[in-house]
Amino acid sequence: MLRLLKAAIFGLLIAIVGLLVSFFPATHHFEEDFELGLLFKLRGARKAPSDVVVISIDREASERLNVPQNPDRWPRSLHAELIDHLVHEGARVIVLDMYFIEPRSGEANAALAAAIRNARNVVLAEPLRLDEVPASSLVDSSAAHRVVKPLRTIAPISEAAFATAPFVLPRFPFRINQYWTFQDSAGDVPTFPVVTFQLYALPVYPHFLALLQKVSPQNARKLPTDIATGLKARGVARFMRDIRGIFESDPSLSDKMIAELKRSNLVASGGEEYRLLKSLVRMYSGENRRYLNFYGPPRTVTTVAYDRALRPNEIYESKKLPELKGKAVFVGYSEILLAERQDSFHTVYSQSNGVFISGVEIAATAFANLLEDSPVKTVSSYSYVFIILFWGLVVGSICRSTGTSPAGVALVVLSVLYFAAAEYQFRAEAVWYPIFIPLLVQMPLGFAGSLLMNYFETNRERQNIRNALGYYVPNDVVNQLARNIVDIRRGGQTLYGACLFADAAGYTNLSEKMGARELSDLMHEYFETTFEPIKQNGGIVVELKGDSILAIWKAPGPDVALGKQSCAAALGLAKAVVRFNQAFASVSLPTRIAVHAGEIYVGNIGAGDHYEYGVTGDTVNTVARLDGLNKYLGTQILVSQEVLHDLSDFLTRNAGSFLLKGKTQPVIVYELLDRAEDANDERKRACATFSDALGAFRRRAWDDAEMKFHQCIDILGEDGLSQFYLKLCKEYRRHPPDGSWTGVIPIDEK
């Protein structure tokens, strides 16, 4: 459960990060430039509707018509002639994507105006100009001081047209991905792809008004019943703004009208009227800015050279001119290589060799999108947020709830499936699902974040294990295990070491009187107290058995420092036991301590599936025997001669030479009394007296020895070691040792 909770929290974090990244403007630009371009390239070119034709003004047409290469200098009579020909061919809408703002001769203007007036279906492009406005004339002086104003087409020509409308696009280096249906920077005026579509769809206006009447009679009354009268009274721009205003005031109108349309008789026919009505509703109800659904590289939309459209029989007798009847014809600059021309734009299909898409083809593409109701559709804001959050949760949960390799495979599979679904939706429905954030931000972030968290968690677990092992084995062994746990059974080394063995007297009786838990708690306090001086002096506790402690100090060879540290630890341990016994008045654990030095084997001891870290060797056996010797000698701390070698920091007295049980060689033993600097004169005098007494004992001068042992007792008050030798003196007086005796005392018990 905890693992699942961590996975969910991590997934939520990845989801939130993805959502935050989506708010950056740079993210949006990258999505448009990278995602949209990639989706278009994967989809490839698609067939443009045959109802749209572009008539291209280019360099070749200029040469064949023997006119200036600058289209602005072409005789306007040519345009009049082209309009007459297009009307003759039955073009439904004619769009001139060129500006007529410079005055020319009256005859040329009159001829063009007459052709436009007779056609009654011509839409003219209207340029926009960015003007500076003095701050003093603005209510809010902090507002932008620039506004967009239209540059009017000269009166005879503009008055003859069905409408004039702007169509402004951002220029290179910005990639063209969107266009405006209503140019909000110029007073929310309709752009000429929208005006063109409204003109193209005029025949279905009565059906449009009837649909609106059914779903919203009060709004239907705001529009004229006769389209011709309404357009003449209001003008095209105002008429279209009024319709747009109705849909903006009630956003639900669109869905209601589409639903009503689907219930009408037009659905069964599935013809042009149904298609136009649906597209017309979508056009007025959608966003002002829409994504262009490009059909492919330049000239994917059916394109005819200007001279061929103007005089098809004279120049292209062998080639048939495309059918123009009932179609929307866009006339404008459309070179093959447009990178250096003013009316060229960078799009997803721009090429490095300078092939750009012209403004007139973009306008034709926008019109075709309206005609087919097929713009690139982004998912709604709610859907976008849901996808980012859901994907983040999925990625994070997978990464944190499974292993690294399974998570990597799962993420790759899910990403491929997601990308395939996104590509299919774009290809089939022109729906643009987010790709950058889910696949290039959240997925690698989730995987990398999971790896990083796994790394830290693994390190934390290892550290916890190391800390736990540190309670049982020394740190250097823990480090060795961490480096090469495979060789744990073979790990070990022979070293020189000092061993301290401590044993609490009375533990057995105490365990009979106390409960197991109470005894465990007591011994925990005891060990905490006794471990402290060992650790302070650099010792390592390697073994606990009931009430006994085995600690070691190790070095590659004999080292005076080991004896000094182990003796200091022994004295500190004795004092710690006194404090412990004082703290627990009802409990007493007097402790015997022994220290010996020599060769030891340190490593893992055991077999099969059970090993323990410990020390073995004669040194360990000897120190355990020395600890038991304390009981016979009535001493607290005994150390061997090997420990005190070259050491003068402590007050000691030679306790004698003993042949311990199971040993073949005697051990010279000393009683450790105090630090040399802390010892008082009485204890020093007692040690000197005891040394004389021991010498007399070894010479078999029993009377002299007894006298001096009694002197030691008088000085110290109580002296277990002197008492031990007094008993031996009596014993040896009655039963003298043989002649080979050298003062070594045999100990038959452990």
Image (cartoon, rainbow, N blue to C red):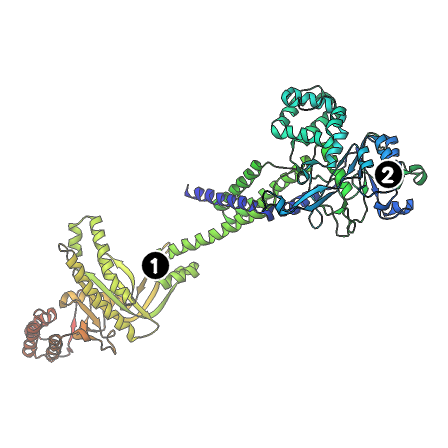
What's the amino acid at mark 2? Answer: Asn
Image-based side of 175 in relation to 603, left or right:
right
Q: Is residue 750 visible?
A: no
Q: Is residue 536 left or right of residue 443?
A: left
Q: Pick whichever, 577 or 373, lies toward us.
A: 373
- Of label 2 and label 1, which has the lower sequence position? 2
> Is residue 5 in view?
yes
Residue tagged 1: 470
Q: Which quadrant, please, contains the C terminus?
A: bottom left
Locate residue 374, reporting x and y percent: 70, 34
In terms of depth relative to the viewer, which is nearer, 548 or 40? 40
* Disc ID at residue 215: none
Q: Quadrant of the N terminus?
A: top left
Q: Is residue 643 left or right of residue 275?
A: left
Counting from the top left corner in percent of width and height, residue 237 is at 72, 32
In the picture provided, is 153 more to the left or to the right than 139? Answer: right
Q: Position of residue 535 (x, y in %)?
A: 28, 64
Residue drawn where x is 76% and y is 43% of the image: 359
Front of the two marks 2 and 1: 2
Q: Is residue 730 or residue 542 the one in the foreground?
A: 542
Res 469 → quadrant? bottom left
Q: Could you tell me residue 649's position as x and y percent?
A: 22, 76
Q: Quadrant of residue 150?
A: top right
Q: As rendered, which of 706 and 437 lies closer to the eye? A: 437
Amino acid under label 1?
Gly
Q: Which residue is mark 2?
A: 109
449 to 292, vertically: above or below: below
